[in-house]
Image (cartoon, coloured by chain):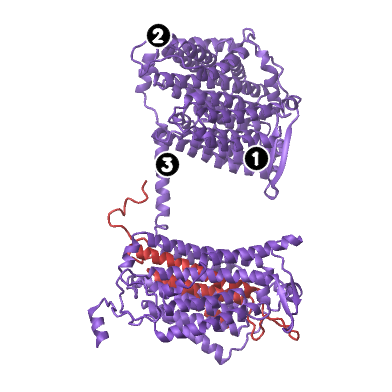
Amino acid sequence: MSLFILVALPFLGALLPGIMNSAGRAACAGVTFTVSLLAFLGLLTNLPAVWAGEVVTARIDWLPELGLNFTLMLDGLGFFFALLILGIGLLIIAYARHYLSRDDNMGEFFTYLLLFQGAMVGIVLSDNILLLLVFWELTSLSSFLLIGYWKHLPEGRQGARMALTVTGMGGLAMIGGMLILGQIAGSYDLSVILQNRELIQADPLYLPALILILIGCFTKSAQFPFHFWLPHAMAAPTPVSAYLHSATMVKAGIFLMARMWPVLSGTPEWFMIVTTAGLVTMVLGAVIALFKHDLKALLAFSTVSHLGLITMLLGTGTAFGAMAAMFHILNHATFKAALFMSAGIIDHETHTRDIRRLGGLRVLMPVTFVVATLAALSMAGIPLLNGFLSKEMMLEEATHTTLFGMPLLVPVLATIGSLFSAAYCFRLIGHVFLGPVRDDYPAKPHDPGPGLWLPPAILVVLVVVIGVAPFVAEPFVKMVTASVLGGEAEVPKAYFKIWHGLVPALFMSIAAVVGGLLLLAVFNPALRFWDAAPRPEAKAIFESIVEAVARLAQALILPLHNGAFSRYAAIGAVAIVAAGFHAWSTGTVGAPTRELQPAGPVPIAGWLMLVAATGGMVLMHRNRLLSLILIGIVGLMVSIGFVFFSAPDLAMTQFTVEVVTIILLLLALNFLPKTTPVESTVLRRVRDAGIAIAGGLATFALAYHYLLRDAVTTPISEFHLANSYKGGGGTNVVNVILVDFRGFDTYGEIIVLGIAALLIYALTETLLGGPVRARLLNRKPDQPRAGDMHPMMMVVLTRVIMPVILMVGFYIFLRGHNEPGGGFISGLVVSIAVVMQYMASGFSWTSARLRYPYHGVIGAGVLIAGLTGIGSWFVSKPFLTSDFTYVRIPPFQEFELATAALFDLGVFLAVVGAVMLSLESFSRLARRAHVPDSEYPMDIDPSRDDPQPDAAAGGAR
Amino acid sequence: MELLVASAIGILTAGGLYLLLRLRTFPVILGISLLTYAVNVFLFASGRLTTAAPPILRDDISLYADPLPQALVLTAIVISFGMTAVVVMIGLGAFLGSDDDHVDDQPAPDEDKAEGTS
C-alpha cells in the first residue's frame, strides 16, 4: 500500500466514527477497527521490501521553496514504530469498545483516537523534518483532546492542559532545533540530513540544535525534569493511557532520538545530556512509583522510569546500546500496555484504583490475575519473560558505561533503578492480587468479558513467547537496529539468549530482584519515611510558573489592550508614523525629476475651500449637522479636483457617492444625539492634535516627494493605454481596466459591496427583532417634525425628474466603455433617483411600488457578472476574457457590442442593489408605532407631536 | 500645484486622525471618511498630476493621465461607501442598544478589577 494512503487512512477514517455514532456502539467501534486494520494490513504489505533492507519512499513536492515537501519513507525503524502504533491500536480499539460506558460519546473518542493514530504514523514515516514537526504538533493536540476526553473531570482538564503546555513548549523548542539542523545540512529531508554527520557535528550551531531537539524529545517522552506531566495525564480514560502514555506517544521522543541517532549521537555532549537525563529519570521514576497508591499513577511513574532506561541506552551512543533500546521498546510496549489495560479492568470491576483498598483479587479475578502478574513479572525482570532479556542487556551496557569519570556510577544507579522497579512490580502483584480476600471493595469484583481481557492477554502471549524463545524476535530487532544505526556502526553480533553465563549483569539482576523483594518486606516503614520526607510538588510548581507567566502577560498587554478603540488608533497612528520616519531618516531620496506645475487662482480657491471645510469640521465637530454639511463640501472639492486632474470617471463616482453617503449619515443622525459633549481633557486634545499633525505632516511629505519624482520603472499603465482599444474595444481606458483588464478584481469588489449591504440588512433585522424595536417604535423625536411630511413640490418634482434621471443613467451606462461613465456611476445615479422617491413620497408608498427585492438585484448583478466570465470558458478562454464586435442596425450608426458591457450590467445591478438595500435598511429603523404608514403621497401630519413645549410654542407663534 | 495637492492630503489626514481619536461614534465615522478622502487622493496622486488629459483615447493625442490609479480609486470610492455604511450601522446599533455612543469600553462600576484575572 502506498505510504500516502497509509498516513491518510486514519485521518480520513476519523470522519467515520462521528457519523456512525448513531448507528450504535458496535458499529462505531467496528468502523474504527476496520480503518485501523486496513492501515495495519497496508503496513504489512511493505514488510518484504523493508525486510530486504530497502527504504520505501513516496514524495509530493508541497512547498519546495521552503524546503517543506510531503516526503515519506519507511525503513526498519519506521516500520517498527508503525507496527506498534497500528498493532497496539487495534487491541486498544477493541478494549475501548468494552471499556467506555454508555454515557460516553464513543464517536468523539474514536475520532480523536484515529486522529492521534494518523499523526503518530505521520511522525514515524516522515522523511522531511518540517513535515515531521507538523505531525509532532498534531500528536500534542490530539493527545490534549484525548486526555481531556472526560470533560466533566477537573483533573482531566488540568492534566490535558499541562500535557499540552509541556509538550507544546517542547515542540516549539524542537522547531527551532530542526530549523537550525536543516540550515546546517542545507536540506530538510531526513535522508539528506542523515548523510551529513561530520558536517553537522562540526558546526558551531550543533550544540544549540542538539539541546533544542532534545528538549522536544524529553518533554514528549517525559524525561527529567519534564517528567511531571505524564502522571497527571493519567486522568485520561485507561485506553488512552495504555495507548498514548505507554506504547506510542511517549515513545515519539525516543523515536526521534533513535531517528537522529546517526547524526547527533556519539559526541560528548550527546552522551552527557542524554545518558544523565535517562539515568536520573530511571531512578527517580522507579522510586516515586513504588510509593504511589493509585494503580495508574504507579504505572505512569514506572513508564517514566522505563523511558529513562531507554533514553539512557540511546545516550551511550554504542551500537549495542541502540539495539538494547530497540528491544526494550518492543518489550515495554507489550508488558506495559497489558498492565495498563489490566489496571483499567480492575478499575472497571472494583470501581477503585487505590492499591490500599485492593488485595486478594487473585481468587475473584483469576484471568486478570494471570495476565497482570505475567506482565508485572516481566517488568520486574524475571527470566523466561521478555523484560528480563532487555533488562539484562541494559545492565550489560551499564557495566561498560563510564559517566563523570566514575566507572561504578552507572552500574550502581542502574541496579538501584532495577531494584526499585522490581519492588513496585512485586508490590503491584502482592498488594492487589495476593493476600486475603476483603469484604469492603467498592463494587463486587469479578472477571470481565473477553472483550476486556483478550487484548491484554494477546500482549502477554507475546511477552511469554519472546521471553522463552528470544531468537524469534532477534532478526526483527536487528533489522530495526540496522536502520537506527544507518551505516554509522555495525549491528552487534550478540545473540539474544536467556543464559549468558556468570556475567556481571546476571549478578546485578539477581541483586535487583532479591533487593526488590526485601524492600517490599519493609514497605510500611519505608512508606512512613517517604511520606515524612519533604519533596517538591511538581504540579504546584508548574501552576505557579504558569500563573506568573500569565500575570506578566497581563501586565504587558492589558494596559495596551484595554478595550479603548481610541487608544489602539493612537498607538497605530504613532507606530505607522514612527516607522515612516525611521525609513525617511535612514533612507535616501533622489533628486526631483519633475517640474512644479504652476497653480492658477481656481485650484487655489478650491484648495482654500477644502482646507476651510476640514478645519471647520475639526473645530466645530461637536455640532454634528454642521460637520456633516462641511464634509459634503470636502467631498465636493475632492470631486472637482478629480475633474481638474483629468479623472472624469472618478469625479462622477465621487460626486454620486457623496450624495448617497450624506443621505446615509443624515438617516443615522436622525437617531443619534445632535451634538457631541465635551469630555476629553485639554491635555488629551493636545495629544491627539500632536498625533494628527504628525500624521498629516508625514502624508504631506510623502505625497509631495513622490509627486515631484517620476516612477522608478515604467508603469503597467502604458500597456493599458496601448491595448485598451485594440484588445478591449473601448476608448475609456479607466472603464476598460475595470471591466476587462482587472475584471476579476472588480468582480470581487461588487461581491464585497453586496456582502456589506447584506450585513447592514442583517444588522437591521437583528435590531428590529430585539429589545431595541420597542424603543424605536415609541421614540419621541427630539426635534419638531415638519407638518407636511411629504411636501407637494418635492413629490411632483422627483416624479417628473425620475424618468429623466433613469435615462441619464442609461446613457452613462451605455457610453461608459468609450466615454466617462460605466456601471458603477450609472448604478449610483439610478440609486439616487430611487432614493429621491423614498424621500419625497414616503417609505411605504415607494416600497409598495417596488417589484424586485434588493437582495435579488444584488444577486442578479453578481450572477450576471459571473456568468459573463464563465461564458468565456465555452470558447476555451480563461475566466472573464472579453470579446467585442461592431454591428450596424439601420438606421442607427454602427455601434459596438462587447461582453464587457454585459459584465458592466452586472456591476450596475450590484451597485444599485447594494446602495438601495443599505439605505432602505436605515430607513426602516425610522418607522414609528403611533404614526401609521401613509399610503398616500403628499400627506399632511396634523399631529406634529412636538416633544418640547417651548419648541411647540415657538412653532405656534 | 503639487504643493496644493500634497498639503491637501496632509490636512485631510490630520483632520481625519484628530476626529478618529474622538470619543463618540459620529465624529469617529466622519474622521474615517476624511481619512478615506486622503487615502483616495493619495492613491490617485500616485499616477502623478496631469491636467486636461483624461485617459479617453483620441486619435490625435498621445499624452494621457495614468488610468490605473483612477480605476483603482474608483472602486475604492464605492467600496468605502459600503464600509462607511457598515460602520455607521454598527455604531447606530450600539447606540440604540445601550443609549451610549462612546467608541471605547466604559469602565463598569463594580467589575473593574475582576476582568482578566482568570
Q: Where, quadrant-wise, is the N terminus of chain A in this rendering?
A: top right
- The purple-tinted chain is A
Q: Is residue A288 left or right of residue A869?
A: left
Q: Where, quadrant-wise, is the C terminus of chain A in this rendering?
A: bottom left
- Shown colour of chain B: red
Q: Residue tagged by mark 3? A: A546
- Return the disc, 2 or 1, that comes first in the chain's sequence: 1
> Which residue lies at the image location 72% right of the left edge and 17% below the top edge?
A493
Tell me where residue A412 appears, x and y as whole percent.
53, 18
Q: Circle 2: is it few (<14), some (14-19), or many (20+) Cα within 10 Å?
A: some
- Amino acid at the residue labelled 3: Val
Tell me where residue A741 appears, x and y as whole percent.
69, 69
Q: CB atoms at circles 3 and 2 under 8 Å apart?
A: no
Q: For numbered disc 3, what is the local secondary structure? A: helix
**Comparing labels 3 and 1, the label whose residue is closer to the camera:** 1
| Label 3 and label 2 in one chain | yes
Q: Residue tagged by mark 2? A: A435
Q: CB atoms at circles 2 and 1 under 8 Å apart?
A: no
Q: Residue tagged by mark 1? A: A129
Tell me where residue A407 appears, x and y as whole percent.
58, 20
Q: Disc 3 versus disc 2: distance between alpha carbons?
A: 44 Å
Q: Chain of mark 3?
A: A
On screen, residue A522 above or below A659: above
In front of the other: A491 or A620: A620
| Label 3 and label 1 in one chain | yes
Residue A359: quarter of image: top left
Residue A47: quarter of image: top right
